Every structure is written in C-alpha cells, then in structure tokens.
Amino acid sequence: MKNKKTVIYMIVLAVLFTTMAGSWSRKEPKHLALSNSYLYDVDEDGNYEITVEYLDSPSGGTTAAGNEKFVVMTHKGKTPPTTIRDPGMTVEKDVFGAHNRVRFFSERLAKKGVLDLLDFFVRGYITDERPYLIVIKNEDPGMIYKADKGFSDRVGDYIYEMGDNRGERTLYSAFVRTLDFCVDYYTEGQQCVTGVVEVKPNPVSLEEAAEDDKPKKYYMSFEGLAVFKEDKLVGYLDGEDTMSYKLLADKAKDSPMAVSVEGEDLSIVLRKSSSKIKTSMKDGKPIVEITLTNMVMISQNNTKYCVSDKDELKIVEEAMNKDLSQRLKKSITKVQTEYKSDIYGFGKHLHMQQPKEWKKVKDAWDDEYFPKAEVTVTVKNMVDFEGQSLEKFGEKNVKQRKY
Amino acid sequence: MTKKPYITSIQVAAISGGSALMFPYTFLPVLRVTPANQDAWLVVLLSLLYMILFNVPILLLINKFRGLNAVEIMETVMGKPAGKASAFLLFMFAMFCFFSCMQAMSIYLKLYIIAETPLWVIIMFLLIPLTYASMKGAGVVARLGVTVVPFVVLTIVAFFIMGIKDMEIANLMPIGADSSFLDLNYGAILTAARFSEIIVLAVFSYYLKDDVSINGTYFKSILIFGSTFLLMTLATLLLMGSGVAKLQNNPFLSYARQVGGGEILQRVQALNIFSWFGGSILKLTIYNYIASFILSKIVGSNKLKPKHYAIPLSLIAFILTFIPVMRKMSTLHYINSELIFPSIVFSVVVVLPVIILIVYLFRYKAVNKATTDLLNAKKQQEEQQNMEESNVQSVANQPQPQPQPPTAQNDP
C-alpha cells in the first residue's frame, strides 16, 4: 500500500515537472513576441538601430492559411538593451529573446567594434551564446529581410538550418556561433572571424509564373568570412581564402572542392582533414610549419590520369598536394599582409608549444610578428576511394589494366 | 526518549559530498581563484589533497570520540562552558552556511531563472520542504541525500557527455606553463578552504553503526565531490575556455545552456535547473538540521528536540533574506569572496578542531575517563531502552482475550 502511494506521488511529481518546463516565468507564452533574428546597426550619431524579426506565439503562430505569423520591426535607441526592449512601443507583446537564432551586424557597426554588444550578449540573463554571428556586406543591411528564405518561413530559421545542416560541409562559408567568437576573443594568439552574407539580385525571375510561385527578387550568398581584429571588422575573405582558413582550423568534414592537376580540374570530397601546426621562434622571427593531411574521395576526374591505378594515382596525389599547398600559402600571405590579424591561431600554437617565447612576443604579435612569420605548408592528400567507376567515363579504347 | 536512527555509510557520503558539490555547481569559484586560467583543473586536483589535509583534525576527533556527538565531544574535551561556547561557534557557522546558501539560491532564482516570481514565494518554496525534511530528522535527511545526489551527479555526467563534441582540448593548453607552482598551491589552498562539509560528516557520523568506517565514509564523500567537481571544471573550461568561463556568474549553468545546440536538447537544460534546485534544497536541509541539532544539544532540554528548532531557524533565515542589502548580488559576491568565505570555513573546520586537539593533549587522562563514563552511561541507557521496547513488543504479541458473546441479561 505504501509503495503504491509512493508510485502515485512520483507520477504526480513527474506530471507537474512537464508543466514547469514550458516557461521560465509567470508570463503566458501567448503574450510573448519571440524573436528569431536581430540585425544590429548604428546611425551616424552612434545610436543603435536594431531590427528584430518577431514570431507570434503560441496562439499557434499560424494564420488561417497555415502560414506562421511574424513581423519585422526596427527600434532605435542609445544602447542595445534599451533599444531591444522596443522603446517606441511598436510591438504589443512582451519581447522574449531566448529563442533567437542569429545576430546580424551591419558593416558600419562591425567596423566600429562589437565589444559593447558582446558584453550585452554575455551579461543578459535571457540572451545566450548560441546564435550565429554574421556580418551583412550590403550598404542597406535591412535587405536581408527581403531576400529569399528557401524552405524556411523566417530569416533566423533559414540561417540556423543552413549553419547546422551545411555549415561544416562547406569550405567556402563560415558559420560562427557567438560562443566561438567569444572564446576566440579571449584566446591568446587567436583573432576572431564571423560568417558573412551578401544580399544579391536573384538571377531567376520567372516572369510568367503566378505571383505566389515567383521567386523573390533577392537571395543570400554566404560565401566568404569576415575577419576581425580584436572586436573590429578589418575585411573579408573570399570563398577560396575561407577554404584555407577552414582547413587550417580543422573545420572541414565531407566537404567538396576542386583541385588542379596539371591544369585540369579534379573534383574531390575531403572526407576527413586534420592540420598540425608546429611553431618556433628563430632570430626574432616566427617559424610556422603546417602539415595538412586529407583523406580524399574523388567525385569527378577531368585529368588524363587513371585514378584507379596506383602509380598514376601517386602522380595525381603529388599534383594535388602541390596545388593545395600553393593555394594555402597564398591565402595565408594575404591575411598576413593585408589584415595583420592572426585568424589561423599561429600565436595560439606558439603559446601552447613555446610558452616562454610567447610571453616575449604576445603584445606585438598581430602587428609585428604574425605578418613576418615564415610559413611552410606541406599537404598530404591520400585518395582512399576513387569513386564507383574504375575508368574515366567515355574512354572506349583503354588498354587492359592489371587491377 | 526516541531511539537513535542508524544511517549507512553511503548515505552520509552522499549528503556530505552532494552538499559540497552545490557550491561549485552554482559558482565554480575555482575558475576565478589564482591562477585563474586554463590550469583551474590542476587547482581542483591539488585542492583535494589540501582538503584531506585540512580535515585531518576533525577526522581524528570523530574517530577518537566515536559514539559521542559533536557537542558532547567539545564539552568532554574542553569542559562544559568552553565546550558550549565552541558548540555555539559551530551553530553560528551552520547558520551562516544555511543563510548564505539560502541567499544565493533566492538571488539566483529571482534574478536568473524565475525573475517575475515574487521573492517571498521563492523563499517559501524553499523553506517549506526543507524545514519539513529537517524536522523529520537525520534518517530522512540521509535518505533524501541518496535520492537527490545521484540525480545531481547523473545530470552533471549527462551534460558533460552532451558537450563533448563541442569541446576543444586546446582550451586547456598550455598545461602548467602560465601558472607558477606557488600560484597553483595558493589557488588550491583557497579552494580547499571552502570545503566545509566535513562538518556534515562530523554531525552525521554519530548516526553511523559502530562497525562502519568513518574514514571510509569520508573518502567516499571526497570521491563523489572530487570527481564531479573535476568534471564540471573540465567541461566548462573545455567548452568555453578560461576567459569566457570565468566571466560567468554561473559558469556550469551557462555551460549547460550552450550544449546540445537546440531543439530537444535545448529543452533538456531544464533538467539542469531541477537538479540544481533539488541539490540546493538538500544542502539547505542539511544545514538547517545541523544548526537545529547543535542548538538542541547546547540547550540540553529533554523537552526540546532538534525538530523544535527547525521552524524558528528557517524563520530567521526568511527574515534575514528580506534585508535589502542581503538581496544584492554584490553582497553575495562579498560573502563568497576569497576574503570572507574561506577564512570563516578555515577557522571552524581547521582552527577550532586543532584547538580542541591541543586541549585534549593537555587533559587526555581526564578526557579519556569522562569519555568512557559517558559512553557507558549511553550504553546502559540504550540497553534499558531496548529492554523496554522488547517488553512492549511481547505484551503486544500476547493473545488478546476473545470478546464474550452478549448474554441474554445484557441484551436490551
């Protein structure tokens, strides 16, 4: 009897817990406007302009037609926390930011510095460090809310899905969460990056299509990344240079790319990639030796070589190694000379490997030592799978091979 | 007189280790203590050694005077007046721990988790269950421990596992290079000096059966505390790095908010709050019970048991929490700072027992005799109580006379 009572109590408690998990306060969710994305901008006087994408909740958040209800509003104010609270009283529901997916920075703001905003993100008890950080390249950053959102209903969800599903598998774009930015900011010898987006005119117009089926006039391009020095934007990398960054930062997995073999393209998939960065100081100059090891699958072969033949494959691998190391070197030199911002974390590795040397150079690392670092890149590509075909498609007069 | 409840070794270890765990679970101050860098986990490991060292005096005392409770030990060694005064210090310390934990919980709940709920509702939510459990006595507190602490430990382990894929081993590098040996030891001493739960062992070991090892129980509690403390520190450092982790008021709760990324796992963070809430209530219950127990022994009245003090002590804490200055986070930081908290704990956990040991060395013959007399008296009392109980039992087991069927004369 006593056990029965205990079981009943436990069940009642468990049921009560499920009711508690719905909300953090007494405020009914139907009175909340859940924000999905924020765009932070500043005007010429230094006032903040924050555009927020709100989702109505949870009267279902859906209209009779089945589409979710959401609005985009811009608020203006002196500081981010006061501005975000909608001082102009434009939204009738209580603003709730815990479901935010992405934080956009306008280029203006990012160049000015984002330290104040980061303090707000980390300090706010309802804000957290999960959302992605993305700089909008366009002169008018509000264009982001006019662009096509793919299969998603809201911009925040679109970026969140994009980052989570495809962020790791692309070499040409970066999706960086607020936490990663903050960790890099506090890591000695490491500068920060964020993702970047540019709203471009959509080349597909479909004039003859019905109004509802027509694609939007604009689409978002995520190619490249934004380079920061401390908390300020100093420039962008294109897709090619972003590839170098992601390979050196071990942020690539199952990513497609093309390499050049004697002037011909070979399409590959990097199944796994790992970099080793060895650092030292010689005559007051940092020496950085990078070894990149890739496990590669071939997805298309435009070269004259048969990649199923071990001798010919060796030639292809050597050519791939040479091509990739040259491309990496070129990107690194660009960042060293143009931006003087150690986004690769060479300083971090020097700190880990030569802590005594690091103490001597850390204060002048980015401006003095990083640009003059002598970098050598060794790439070891290992093709472990040449794909499903043994020979290049279309070659009819091939000699009988011994495999 | 009620019979002394016996509790098991694992129950005492659970309440002692679990209670100690709640402080790092809430603040993880080891991240900010010298050297305040990626070597904080080394400080945790070193602090366990210092902790054991600091706890030797109390362990010696409770092993030597096994069978006596904490107040009896002090009175026997130091004499009645000085013993009562020392016991009063211990009572004040338990109240300090009870109140500072209550203050921390209410502030965090109010500012961080359920901001729109009135403070008095939050405090009542805490006080009612903890006072009820404390009034029920040591056995209930111990059983509560083995219910709550495994849940807390499992939650920490689960959150550690969920965060593994996002952890960066580079966040711990370089190991030991940025901290001097002196820094690490200084940090470890300050961290060890925050461990006050040897007091829990000192009070609750009285309820252990004679054949249960006190030292074994102690090391079990250190194992529970040390392993989870290390796990929390490593998880937080590996995910957030030292720089971001030490920025946080609530590092492990912030860590739990990051892991999982979204959707279902994002909602699992509610588990972390439940676990923290349950663990904190347990800690409050333990200290309420300790304070009530010591006060009842100091007063020494046969009529007033520990349970009679539980409600007044909770009421005092309730009132103190409403003093405006006590509701400020900065007051909490001040109390928990390197200056205040470790100094108070060190005075009670190390200095006071060392003084008692020194007094014992000077008067060991008289103390040993008094101890033997007291233990014999207790034994006799227990035997008498057992006899009385068995008599009551045998009377209850005798066949009861069958009720006579009503006779005709008795019929109406």
Image (cartoon, grey):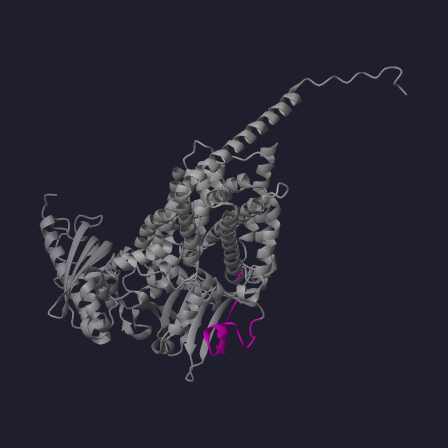
Q: Position of residue A39 (x, y in %)?
A: 43, 72
Q: Identify whether A302 is placed above or below B73.
A: below
Instruction: Tell me: A308 left or right of B61.
Output: left
Q: Identify whether A299 is placed above or below B323.
A: above
Question: Which part of the image, by quadrant, shows the C terminus of chain A?
Answer: top left
Q: Is residue A67 magenta?
A: yes
Which of A167/A43 is in front? Answer: A43
User: How many dots with numbers?
Assistant: 0
Residue A222 falls in image quadrant: bottom left
Residue A173 in view: no
Magenta span covers which residues?
A66-91
Question: Which part of the image, by quadrant, shows the N terminus of chain A?
Answer: top right
Q: Residue furthest top?
A: B408
Residue A260 in view: yes
Q: Identify whether A87 is placed above or below B409.
A: below
Which of B369/B89 is in front? Answer: B369
Q: Position of residue B203 (x, y in %)?
A: 48, 43
Q: Position of residue A223 (x, y in %)?
A: 31, 68
Which of B394/B56 is in front? Answer: B56
Instruction: Tell me: B352 left or right of A377.
Output: right
Q: Is residue B271 magenta?
A: no
Instruction: Tell me: A70 left or right of B51.
Output: right
Which of A327/B390 is in front? Answer: B390
Residue in the picture at 37% in, 69% down: A134
